[in-house]
């Protein structure tokens, strides 16, 4: 054991301590001496003065401990809040991942719908072109039918041809009538077919 001499309030106090603790005990002794001086006890300190100094020092130690405990409590609360925040962060990250996955699905569906719409528009364009071509063909056939009927009517209304030369027998309207009738039948059949096609479209 080691022994340390402490000067407190004009007196020398000898205190035993473990080896290597001498400096610490000296600091503690100076703290007690400073507390007594703060109390106005600069002379020889009696037991009551030493008790008061010890109580004041104990109060400071207790305040320090309470401060440390409060700091520990605040640190524990901060750790709990950090854990809570970490949990909320993890939940938010999971929500973000779910939303990103849903966004990818919606984008894929939108692309599929856009492709399908483009295909439908292409088919619609082809159908419009086919209808336009059909209408043009129909108009052309109607024009041809009109011209054929006009020509038929003109042939029916034409005067009989002049008499043929003496060497050949003269052709009469009666001779051309069967050919005209067959031509008229053919024209009528063409007209019926065109009208049937027009109604079908």
Image (cartoon, grey):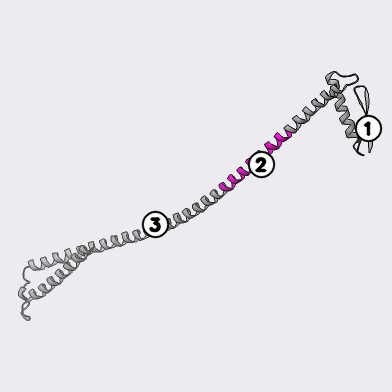
Task: Read off the residue under disc 1.
Answer: 4
List x then y, in percent, for residue 105. Answer: 48, 55
Labels 3 & 2 near each other (Cβ < 8 A): no
Q: Quadrant of residue 13?
A: top right
- Is residue 169 or residue 111 the one in the foreground? 111
Q: Quadrant of residue 44?
A: top right
Relative to residue 45, is residue 105 drawn left or right? left
Location of the N terminus by quadrant is top right
Task: Read off the residue under disc 2.
Answer: 79
In this view, the residue farthest toward the bottom is 167
Residue 117: image tag: 3
User: Circle 2: is it few (<14), some (14-19), or many (20+) Cα within 10 Å?
Assistant: few
Of callouts 2 and 1, which one flags the residue occurring earlier in the amino acid sequence? Answer: 1
Question: 165 above or below 30?
Answer: below
The region drawn magenta spans: 67-91
Q: CA distance from mark 2 to mark 1?
A: 44 Å
User: Circle 1: is it few (<14), some (14-19), or many (20+) Cα within 10 Å?
Assistant: some
List x then y, in percent, for residue 20. Answer: 91, 39
Of the residues tagged 3 and 2, which is closer to the observer?
Answer: 2
Of callouts 3 and 2, which one flags the residue occurring earlier in the amino acid sequence? Answer: 2
Secondary structure mostly seen in the magenta stretch = helix
Relative to residue 12, is residue 121 drawn left or right? left
User: Circle 3: is it few (<14), some (14-19), or many (20+) Cα within 10 Å?
Assistant: few
In this view, the residue farthest toward the front is 47
């Amino acid at each position: 054991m080691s022994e340390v001499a402490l000067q407190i309030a004009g007196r020398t106090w000898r205190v035993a301590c473990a080896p290597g603790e001498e400096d610490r005990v000296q600091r503690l002794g100076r703290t007690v001496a400073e507390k007594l001086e703060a109390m106005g006890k600069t002379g020889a300190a009696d037991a009551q003065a030493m008790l008061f100094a010890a109580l004041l020092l104990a109060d400071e130690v207790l305040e320090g401990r309470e401060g440390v405990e409060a700091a520990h409590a605040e640190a524990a609360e901060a750790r709990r809040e950090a854990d809570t925040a970490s949990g909320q962060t993890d939940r938010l990250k999971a929500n973000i991942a779910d939303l990103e996955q849903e966004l990818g699905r919606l984008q894929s569906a939108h692309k599929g719908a856009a492709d399908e719409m483009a295909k439908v528009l292409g088919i619609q364009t082809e159908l419009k072109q086919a209808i336009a071509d059909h209408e043009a063909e129909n108009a052309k056939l109607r024009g041809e039918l009109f011209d054929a009927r006009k020509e038929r009517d003109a042939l029916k209304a034409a005067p009989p041809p002049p008499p043929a030369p003496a060497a050949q027998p003269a052709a009469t309207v009666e001779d051309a009538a069967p050919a005209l009738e067959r031509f008229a039948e053919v024209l009528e059949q063409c007209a019926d077919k065109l009208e049937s096609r027009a109604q079908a479209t």
